Amino acid sequence: MIRKFSVLYVGQIELDNIGRDGTPADQRRYGNEPMVEAYRSMVDVARVMDDEGYYCLWTAEHHFQREGYEVFPNLILLNTWLATQTERLKLGCAFNVLPTWHPIRLAEDFAVADIVTGGRVVFGIGRGYQTREVESLGAPLLDQDANRELFEEGLELLRKAFDEESFSHHGKRFQVPAPVEFRGKPLTEVTLVPRPVNRPVEIWQAVSSGRSVGFMAREGIHGMVTLTGEALLDEWIHLYQAEAAAAGRELELGEGLCWGVAVYLAESDDEAIRRMEPYHDERYKWFEPFGIVRYTDTEGRPWGSPGAPSGSPSLRDGVAQKAWLCGTPQSVIETIREIEARYPGLDQLMIHLPEGMPPREFMEQLRLFARDVMPAFEVRGLPAQV
């Protein structure tokens, strides 16, 4: 039952000349001041969410993006600061790119954030998908097997650091502790100082394929399914439940997952689509070359696979697949209720701030959504955000 309403803000600046026929994504280049302005906008968005009763603001780690689409390189630092600007809002990491971190440094940084924010920072990890970032920071990505191996060993070491009073790890990539003497004695174990106080640490990861779903379900990692067509959404939700059961964890259908969509509210469906369309098209100018179009065709084939459509989708494609919700508050409520009825364990809906939408317009949409949509999901007099 959906009771938590969140937002994903990947960190785009206020872009100019947007839309399908606007400035090509690769031709964008901005100076430092617009990048800095994104941090001021972030505070405004966070405060609106805090005031309106939203659950969590998720942000994304990226590097070197002079194009202005994703300009937040350190989520734990950012979210620790945002906690000082808000009162109740959770602040999620979507996601710390684990292969580019030493797992111990990441564990230490998160532990500090967990302590000083009273548990308001939510931990998330990812493998990365942009070669400019991951390879430049010294981790493999072109070699997907090496990337996955590094990620999985990093996760194993992270969990030891979080969960064990003292630990050691001797793997292919990491040796902790190093084989040295300390104060005249062989060093055989270490302790993370400090450790998070809110344990076990809730870990989130993006769902991008059936393979990732299986890994996450077996490992007890929560999954975020974002801007994904309803056929793939359904496939992955059922797979997550089945894989969790095979690992001995019985879950309600949808439990452990977050459903992410883009939303635009207006007086009519056509008006909402008209207003959202340039933002939708700007998103896929940037993301489609990375292969991030998670729709299927009428035969169930994923977008971009042999025989299926390829290239940038239209907004009406996204609306038809229930990845983009554009319309009146009542029509949006009906779509959310339809998804909620299919997956009784699903408790969190996340709204994506689409690339190109000015923060002022998005904040107005957040207020409208809080006023006209969220009250429909309050449960027996209890507030939606529990």
Image (cartoon, rainbow, N blue to C red):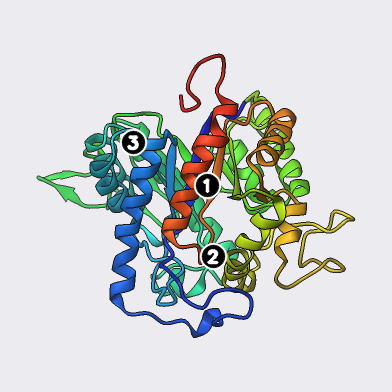
Q: Inspect this view and state whether residue 90 appears.
A: no
- Mark 1 and 3 residues: CB-CB less than 8 Å, in contact? no
Residue 159's x, y, as percent? 41, 39
Residue type for callout 1? Gln
Question: Measuring 72% from the left and 66% from the top, which residue is drawn there?
Answer: 314
Residue type for callout 3? Arg
The label shown at residue 129 is: 2
Tell me the crowding category of disc 2: few under 14, some 14 to 19, or many 20 or more residues within 10 angstroms, Cα based.
some
**Residue corresponding to mark 1:** 205
Q: Nearer the viewer, mark 3 or mark 2?
A: 3
Separation of marks 2 and 1 at Cα, in angstroms: 13 Å
Of all residues shown, which one is farthest toward the top? 380
Dot 2: element:
loop
Q: Is residue 110 above or below residue 279?
A: above
Dot 1: element:
strand
Question: Measuring 30% from the left and 53% from the top, which residue is drawn there?
Answer: 78
Residue type for callout 2? Tyr
Q: Nearer the viewer, residue 191 or 77?
A: 77
Question: Measuring 40% from the left and 67% from the top, which residue is drawn there?
Answer: 13
Q: Is residue 245 left or right of residue 216?
A: right
**Residue corresponding to mark 3:** 120
Question: Measuring 54% from the left and 65% from the top, which residue is drawn there?
Answer: 129
Q: Is residue 140 above or below residue 46?
A: below
Q: Nearer the viewer, residue 171 or 100?
A: 100
Separation of marks 3 and 2 at Cα, in angstroms: 27 Å
- Mark 2 and 1 residues: CB-CB less than 8 Å, in contact? no
Q: Is residue 92 left or right of residue 286?
A: left
Separation of marks 1 and 3 at Cα, in angstroms: 17 Å
Residue 177's x, y, as percent? 28, 48
The quarter of the picture where residue 3 lies is: top right
Residue 338's x, y, as percent? 74, 34
